[in-house]
Amino acid sequence: MTDTTTYPDTAAPSTGPDSDSGSVSGLVHGVYREGEPLFDSKAPAGPIDKKWNERKFAAKLVNPANRRKLDVIIVGTGLAGGAAAATLGEAGYNVKSFCYQDSPRRAHSIAAQGGINAAKNYKEDGDSVFRLFYDTVKGGDYRSRETNVYRLAEVSANIIDQCVAQGVPFAREYGGLLDNRSFGGVQVSRTFYARGQTGQQLLIGAYQALERQVGAGTVQMFARHEMVELIVVDGRARGIIARDMVTGEIETHMADAVVLASGGYGNVFFLSTNAMGCNVTATWRAYRKGAYFANPCYTQIHPTCIPVHGDKQSKLTLMSESLRNDGRIWVPKRKEDCDKDPRQIPEEDRDYYLERIYPGFGNLVPRDIASRQAKNMCDEGRGVGPEVEGQGRRGVYLDFADAIGRMGEDAVRTKYGNLFDMYQRITGENPYEVPMRIYPAVHYTMGGLWVDYDLQSTIPGLFVAGEANFSDHGANRLGASALMQGLSDGYFVLPNTIRDYLASGPYPKVAPDHPAVVEAQESVRSRIDTFLSCQGTRSVDSFHKELGQIMWEYCGMERTEEGLKYAIEQIRALKAEFWTNVRVLGTNDQLNQSLEKAGRVADFIELGELMCIDALHRRESCGGHFRAESQTEDGEALRHDDDFAYVAAWAFDGDDEAPILHKEDLVYEFIELKQRSYK
Amino acid sequence: MATTTLQKKKPISPMHSTIGLKLMMAVSGLFFVLYVLLHMYGNLKILSGRAAFDEYAHHLRILGEPMLPYGGALWIFRILLLLALVAHVYSAFTLWKGAGEARSHKYAVRSAAAATVSSRWMRWGGVALLAFVVFHLFQFTWLQINVGGEFSSPAARVVAAFGVWWLTLIYVVALIALAMHLRHGVWSACQTLGYTSTARARRTANAAGIVLAVVVAGGFLIPPLGILFGAIK
Amino acid sequence: MRIKVRIWRQDGPAAQGKLVDYDLDDISEDMSFLEMLDVLNEDLNERGVEPVAFDSDCREGICGMCGLVINGRPHGNTGGRDGEANTTTCQLHMRSFADGETITIEPWRADAFPVIRDLVVDRTAFDRIIAAGGFISANTGSAPEAHAVPVEKKRADRAFDVATCIGCGACVAACPNASGMLFVGAKITHLAELPQGQPERWTRVQAMVAEHDADGFGGCTNIGECSAACPKDIPLDVISTLNKDLRRSMLH
Ligand SMILES: Cc1cc2nc3c(=O)[nH]c(=O)nc-3n(C[C@H](O)[C@H](O)[C@H](O)COP(=O)(O)OP(=O)(O)OC[C@H]3O[C@@H](n4cnc5c(N)ncnc54)[C@H](O)[C@@H]3O)c2cc1C
Ligand code: HEM
Ligand code: HEM
Ligand code: SF4
Ligand code: F3S
Ligand code: FES
C-alpha cells in the first residue's frame, strides 16, 4: 500500500521538527499551535446509567409563563433542528426556524435509506441500552465520549415511541407489531425502517410536528433563508444574520439562544452523497466567532455508491449497503482486461479481492475497509468503467451472477429490485445482466462543532445538534445511528439542556446599533460585495470542483503526511485565487444561486484547510481514516491510543494565524479499549 | 414570500369548499342520470306503437291523481330537475372559474399523459348539453320549434320530426356529447362520493361509466334512427 | 449529443418572462437532466449571461425540491406510457432524449405557486396546508410505548404507500385545474389509515381542504393527470378517500 503519488515542485509549508512538541515559533508542523486542554464540565459524576436523569433533574426549570418571553433561533430543519423546533415550540418558547430549502421538509435527513437504531430489544435477541452503547463506542473506534453515547442509547427507545405516535409508518409484521432488521454489521436486530425511505418518513414526522407549531404560532418559519453570520454579544450567542434568498435582504434576528442543526459538511469534497446545498457556513461562521471545531478530518466514506461517470457530474448516489450481502466484489487480475466486457472475463482472471484478503468477512468487511480496498484496486490501475479525466477508471464490479444463479432472478428482484432499478436509471445498464459498478463516496461527517454534555458549544448560548456537532460517533459511525442521534438531540436532549441556559434569561435586549450587530451586518455585506465586484474569470463551481479533488485525493480514504502538506499548500493557493478571480454575475437583491454558492465555497475552502491540518496532526489510523504511516505489518489500520485518545477541538485565531488545538482526553470508564481486527 | 407563517384567512366551510361543490355536482349529476334513464325508457315505448307512447305521456301527467292535481307529479319532478340543474351548473361554473384563476399563466407546451378525451370535454360538453336541452324543450315541451309539421299527439310529433335528417343529426351529436359526459361523469361522481378508494373500485366505476354511456346513448338513439330509416312509423 | 433548449427566463416575481433558446452541443447521454442545465449555466457564466435559476437539492429523487415542466410534462414524466417509470426531474437522464431534439422547459404553472425567478417557484402553500392540520398532535414525551397500538398490516402498508409523497408539486403542475388534491389526499389517507390519526380525523380534513382552497389551488374534477405525473405514483384512490372523509366529516 505504498503511495505512488508524486508531488509537483511546490514549497511544502515550513515544517518544524517532526514531532508534536516544540518547534520554531511555537508552530507544530508549521501549521497549528497547541492550547489548553478542554473538558466537559456538564456530565454529572456517578454511574453511567444515572447521569442523564441527574442532569435533567439538575437543569433549571423555566416557568411556563416566562417561556413566551424567551426567543430561540434554530438553524436547520432536519431531524435534529426540526425535532428541536417542534419540541421547544410545544413547550411554549418563541422559536424562529431557518432552512435554505423552500420547505423545512426537504432537509437532507430525507435521503437516509437504511433505518434507525433503537435499543427496544423487541426481538429478544440480547439487545440492551448497554449493548447499543457498547457497539456505538466500538464502532466509533474508541474516539467518542462515553457519557454522550450512553445517553444516546438510553433515549433511543423513546424516539421510536414518539415517531409511532406521530404516525411514522414503520415497517410492521403481520401481527401488526413493528419489524426490525439487523444493519451495519451488528449481531442484534435493532434497526427500525420504513422500506428504503426511513429518513424521509422520520423527517416528515418531525416536519408535521414543526408545522403544527407554525400553525399554533409558536414557531415562525423562515424558509429560503440562509444563515450567513453569528452574532456574539458579550461572549454569548445572541442572534444570526440571515440572507433572504428570494429578496437578498440581509436580516438580523436576535434571540436568547441559538441552536445550529445545519447538518454535515461532506460537500467539501464536491462529489458526495450529500444534497447540492449542504454546507458548512453556519458552523464555520460560528467557528470563526469562537466555537471550537472538533475532529474536522473525521469523514465517513461509503463503499457502495454509483461511480463517477464524467467530469460534469454533480453528485453521487448511494445504494444500500445491503447489496453486499449477496453481491460479490471483484476487479480483473490484469490491467489489460479492464475495458473488456466483464462477462467475457473468465473466473480465473477475476480477483475477488475482499474474499481473498479477508476470508473471514469477505464482502461484508466494514465500510472503511471495503472503501479503501476499492481505492487500492483502482490505484493499481485495475479499476473498471469509464475513464474519468485525471483519475483513471474509478469503479469495481459488484456481481450478482452467483446470487441470480443460486436464488433465481425473481428472488433477487424481490430483494433488491428497487436498487437495481435505480442503478439502471442512473447508468443505463441492466444489473441483472452486466455486473454493477460501485465506488466509495463521501457520505457523512463525524466532525463538527465541539459541544459539552449539554450540546452547548464553547460559546455560551450556542447549542449544536445533529450531524453539525462533533457527534457521538467518534471516528466512525455505525449504520442507522445518525438518524437516532439527530432525533435524540432534537426531541429529548436539547430541549432539556437548553432550559438550564434559558432559565437565566431573558438576556438583556441588544440594541440594533450594538457594535457587534453592526460589525456582523457589515462583514456580511462586504463579503457579498466582494463576490459581486470581483468579476474574475472562473465560476464558483470550478473552484468547488478543484477543492473537492484536492480533498478526495489527499484527505480522503488514505492520507500521508506528505500528501496533506501538499494539500494545505494547494488549498491556500486556491483560496487566494478564489478571492481574486471568482466570477459571480447578477445582483444581491434577487434570487442568485451563484452568489449563494460563492459564500458556501468560500467557507468550504477554509474548512478544507483545517481538515487537512487535523488529518496531518492525527498520525494514527483510526475509524474510517487510514494514515499510511500508521499500519500493521499486513497493511491494516493501526490506532495509537496512548497518543491520540482525545477529541481534537480547533479554535480560530484570526485569518492569518494558525488554528489552536485544544485536546479533550477521552476517558474510558465503562468500556475497555480494543484494536479492531477483521482478518 | 419565503416564510410559511400562517396567514389568518376566513375559513371556508366544508360545503362551500371545492369538494363541497363537487358533491353538489355529483348528486345533481346522478339525479340527471336517473332522469335520462327514465326518459329513455319512456321514449322506447314508441317501439310498442304510437298509442303506447301517447298513453305513457298522458300517464306521466295523471300520476298521483287525485292526491296531486293534473300534471302535479310531473311538476314536482320538473322542479327537482330545475333545482338540480341550477346546482349542477352553479358548481360547474364556480369550479371552472376557480380553475381559470388557479392557472392564469398557461403553459407554452402542454401534453396530457392520462386524461381521457371525455374528461377534458366535460365543461364544453356540458354547455353543449345545456344548449341542446334548451333547444329540445323548445321543440317538445314548449312546442315552439316545429320540425316536420304540427301535431297534437306527442308520438306524431316525434315521428314527424325525426323523419328530417338534420334534426336527427343534431340528436346524434347531442347524444354523443351525453355519452361522453356520462362516461367520465359516472366515474367522477363515484370518486367524488368516495367510493373508489381502491384500484379495483376505480376500474369498476370506470366500467360503469362506459356501460351507462353506451346504454343511454344507444337507448335514446333507437327511436330517432328507427324513424329516420323507416323501421318505426 | 446536440440539443436545443427553450427555457423560461423571468427576472423576478413581478417581471415579464419569455422563452429563450440555447444550443448545447457537448451533452453526454449519461448526464442527468439537471447536469445538462449545470453545463448550460457554466457556459452562460463564461459568456457573462446570468445562469438559469432552477431548484434542486438531493438530486436523488427524494427531497422534492426539483421540478420542471419538460415538453409539457411535469418532471418529463410520460405517465408510464412509453414504458418508462415516473421519476423526478433530477432522476431523468439525457438518454431519454434524442440527438438534435428541442426541449421546452417551463416552471410549474399555478397561481398558488408564484414564479420567483426563471424556473424557481414558491411552494410554501403546501407547508401552509400541512400547518393547517396535516399532523397528529403528539407532544414530545407524551407518546405511549410503540407496541401499545398494533396496526393491521394492510392499513400500515397503505399508509406507507401514500406517505411516500415528496411534496414536489408535480400534481398541481399537471392538473388542468391546478388542483393540489392529490397532495392533500396523500396526507389525509396516510394519517386516516393509522389508529393514531383517528382523533383528529374529521377536523383535519376540513382544515386542510379549507386551506387548500384559500391558497388559490383549483378544485379537483377527477381528471387524473396528477397521478400520472406523480414521481411517487400516488394513486387517485387518495382523492376518493379525501372526498369521502370530507363528506363524512360534515356528519361528525
Ligand atoms: C444518502 C444518505 C443516506 C443516509 N442513510 C442513513 C441511514 O440509513 N441511517 C442513518 O442513521 N443515517 C443515515 N444517513 C445520515 C443521516 O441522514 C444524517 O446524518 C442526518 O439525517 C443529519 O440530520 P441533521 O438534522 O443533522 O441535518 P440535515 O438533515 O442535513 O439538515 C440540515 C438543515 O440545516 C439547514 N441548513 C444548513 N445550512 C444552513 C444555513 N447556512 N442556513 C440556514 N439553514 C441551513 C438545511 O436547510 C437543513 O434544514 C444518511 C445520509 C445520506 C446522505
Ligand atoms: C332522441 C331522444 C329524445 C327524444 C325522442 C325525446 C323526446 C322528448 C319528448 C317527446 C318530450 C316531451 C315529453 C312531454 O312533454 O310529455 C321530451 C321532454 C324532455 N326531454 Fe327529451 N327526448 C330525447 C332526448 C333527450 C335527452 C338526451 C335529454 C337530456 C339530456 C332530454 C331531456 C328532456 C327534458 C328535460 C324534457 C322536459 C321534461 C319535462 O317536460 O319536464 N331528452 N323529450
Ligand atoms: C346542463 C349543462 C351541464 C353542464 C354545464 C355540465 C357540466 C358538468 C361538469 C363541468 C361536470 C364536472 C366534470 C367533472 O367532474 O369532471 C359535470 C359532471 C357531471 N355531470 Fe354534468 N353538466 C351538464 C349537464 C349534465 C346532464 C344533462 C347530465 C346527465 C345526464 C349530467 C351528468 C353529470 C354527472 C353524472 C356528472 C358527474 C358528477 C361529478 O363529477 O361528481 N350533466 N357536469
Ligand atoms: S402527490 Fe406526487 S406529484 Fe404531488 S406532491 Fe406528492 S409526490 Fe409530488
Ligand atoms: S389532475 Fe386535477 S382534476 Fe383532480 S384528479 Fe388530479 S387533481
Ligand atoms: S432534487 Fe431532490 S427530488 Fe430532485
Image: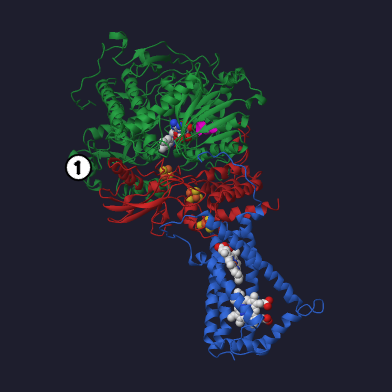
Q: Colour of chain B?
A: blue
Residue A184 higher or lower than B198, as above or below: above
Q: Position of residue A364 (x, y in %)?
A: 36, 34
Q: Let me know if residue A506 is in the magenta part.
A: no
Front one among B146 and A667:
B146
Quadrant of image for the N terminus of chain A? top left
Quadrant containing ligand 2: bottom right
Count the marks.
Answer: 1
Residue name at image x 72 percent, y 76 percent:
B74
Name the spot of residue C110 as percent of width and height, x first.
Answer: 49, 52
Q: Quadrant of the C terminus of chain A?
A: top left
The residue positioned 56% from the left and 54% from the top of the image is C239
**Up-down: is C62 above or below A602?**
below
Q: Nearer the viewer, residue C160 or B98?
A: B98
Q: Main secondary structure of the magenta part?
A: helix
Give the chain letter at badge 1.
A
Any part of residue A383 in sight? yes
Question: In the visual, does A138 lie left or right of B167?
Answer: left
Q: Is A439 drawn above or below residue A36 in the view shown?
A: below
Chain seen in red: C
Q: Chain coloured green: which letter?
A: A
Extent of the magenta region: A78-83
Vertical arrangement, residue A358 with respect to residue C102, above or below:
above
Q: Which residue is mark 1?
A: A337
